[in-house]
Image: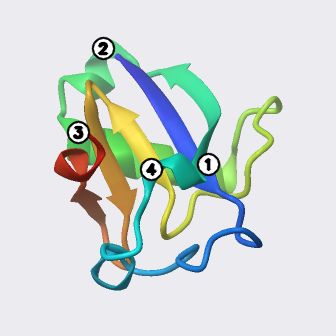
Amino acid sequence: MNYKIYQVDPHDCDYAFEWWSWARDRFNFKDYKLVYEGEVSDSAYAKGNDYVLERLFTKFNIDHPKDFRGHSLSVSDIVELDGKYYYCDNVGWTDITKFIK
């Protein structure tokens, strides 16, 4: 399974690093830029999206790839998995797919 990571420039976006409950009314996917794409192993994918999201969070905070040029994965970042979009929230992930399509 492929994944994509999207981030906003905190200088250009007033809801950068904000919880979804606060950002929802201001949210615009056009504020985001694709900063990284990669693949998740089949064994991780088989464990479900929650597992994959948590693994990606750890990877992009502790041991991110050398070619990653974004900031560490944080609140307000978006990860796309299997056609669904997940907002990194204050605790866990919020499915925001309906706000993007």
Q: Label 1 crowding class (10 Å Cα cut-off): few <14, some 14-19, many 20+?
A: some
Q: At 53% from the left edge and 40% from the top edge, which residue is drawn?
A: 5
Label 2 vs 4, first from the N-terminus? 4
Kindly report the distance in space between the C-alpha atoms of the residues bearing marks 2 and 4. Answer: 28 Å
Instruction: Give the residue pinned by disc 1.
Output: 60
Q: Nearer the viewer, residue 48 or 84?
A: 84
Secondary structure of the residue carrying numbered label 4:
helix
Q: Earlier in the sequence, mark 3 or mark 2?
A: 2
Would you name the residue on which mark 4 appears? 29
**Of tags 1 and 4, which is closer to the observer?**
4
Which of marks 1 and 2 precedes in the sequence? Answer: 2
Amino acid at the residue labelled 2: Asp
Residue 42's tag is 2
| SS class, disc 2 | helix
How many residues crowd mark 4 within 10 Å: few (<14), some (14–19), many (20+)? few
Q: Amino acid at mark 4?
A: Phe
Lower sequence index among marks 1 and 4: 4
- Secondary structure category for the residue under label 3: helix
Residue, x 48% and y 80% (percent of image)?
18
Dot 1 or dot 3, earlier in sequence: 3
Q: Which mark is residue 49?
A: 3
